[in-house]
Amino acid sequence: MKLLGTTFLCGALWLALITTMHGSLNLKWFAPKVAGTTKAEDKFRIGFLPVTCHLTCPVTDFINQQVEGQSTFEPVRFSGWPELKEAFLSGYTPATFILAPMAMALREQGVPIKIVYLGHRDGSAVMVHKDSKIYRMEDLRGKRIAVPNRYSNQRLLVFRALKQAHMTVKDIELVEMPPPDMPAALYSKAVDAISSGEPFMGQTEIDGYGRVLWLTKDVWPNFISCVLAVREDFIKNDRETVQRLVDGIASSGKWLDQSMDHRMDAAKFVAKNYYNQHPRLLEFVLSKPPDRVKYTNLALRKADFEEIEVLALEAGVIQKDVIFEDYTDASFVPDDALVKPSSYEGLKGGEVPPRK
């Protein structure tokens, strides 16, 4: 009886060992998992907002589907910065498009975040009511200016413009407002000026009551608002996937800037499948003028970020000097001369295919 029990125990242990080995070697039970991946298709999630600063995210996803039959990631649209940030902090999205100053501040707070690429260049504006008497920064003295939030580069843009006009933030009333609410606030004259990423600034022009005080490309050349950032555990566990993501964003950017036809195609399929906006908004801001926002020259340049660092420190966004090499990982940035536009030929005047 005792021998039978021993034999049964040995058999059970052997079965458990074989099962564990099978699960480990073939089913990858104990392989490290990247937070935010889905079990069904092993895709990872990327957070984005429906703004032109994040346009390469849906464009890359759509082109991947049309050219390769599937995308390697799942783009997740958020309605505002707080939700997008919390999704990243929780690990729900291991990658995200995010405000550059916000990424710096999170890193300073100990969040394992790394900026790996840019989302755009330029692509913002300061708008005033067409009937106003505001034609220069000095005319905003005593006026109300709306910016997205304290971490936005549009807020830093205002600080920069104030310094150039020999003014301080005490000379204006700065208010924080969600970008989708800004056009209505300007229309009703609840504020005197607004600044955010597109296409909300362009909407005021299309609707006939907004006037450009300045485009950021004219006052802060190669302006950066949003960047592509990933979690450090994502980099540690799967560098190859992060590199593939950056390369895809780079190729999509080159495709967007290759021709106006590509931009107009993107306006259609992004508006329909990702942004839930009227295509005319994106068509306007991607063409009037054509360099209102750019998607090339997206490498991480230390000098660009150092200017943001100085302004962020003065504005109280960060509390001490931050180190470029600490909050960025430039090892994924491809040689721009070697980046080729995506091979997608565009809509060719046909119907916009749905997102798969």
Image: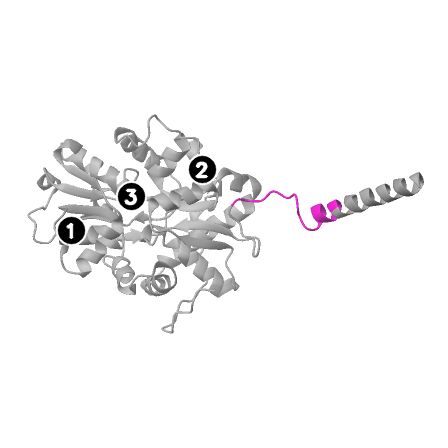
Residue type at tag 2: Ile
Which residue is disc 2 drawn over?
113
For the N terminus, the image quarter is top right
Dot 3 or dot 1: first in sequence order is: 1
**Residue 203 in the image, given as x and y percentages of width and height:** 22, 57
Note whether 307 is above or below 116 in the view shown: above
Q: CA distance from mark 2 to mark 3?
A: 22 Å
Residue count near mark 3 (Cα–Cα under 10 Å), binned few <14, some 14–19, many ≥20: many
- Relative to 64, 207 lies left or right: left
* Dot 3: element: loop
Residue type at tag 1: Leu
Write the start and end of the magenta stretch as one range.
Answer: 20-35
> Of tags 3 and 1, which is closer to the observer?
1
Q: Which mark is residue 223?
A: 3
**Residue 172 in the image, given as x and y percentages of width and height:** 14, 36
Q: Residue at x 57, y 41 (%)?
A: 237
Say if mark 1 contacts mark 2, CB within 8 Å. no
Residue type at tag 3: Phe
* Dot 1: element: helix
**Residue 96 in the image, given as x and y percentages of width and height:** 42, 46
Dot 2 or dot 3: first in sequence order is: 2
Which residue is disc 1 drawn over?
186
Q: CA distance from mark 3 to mark 1?
A: 23 Å
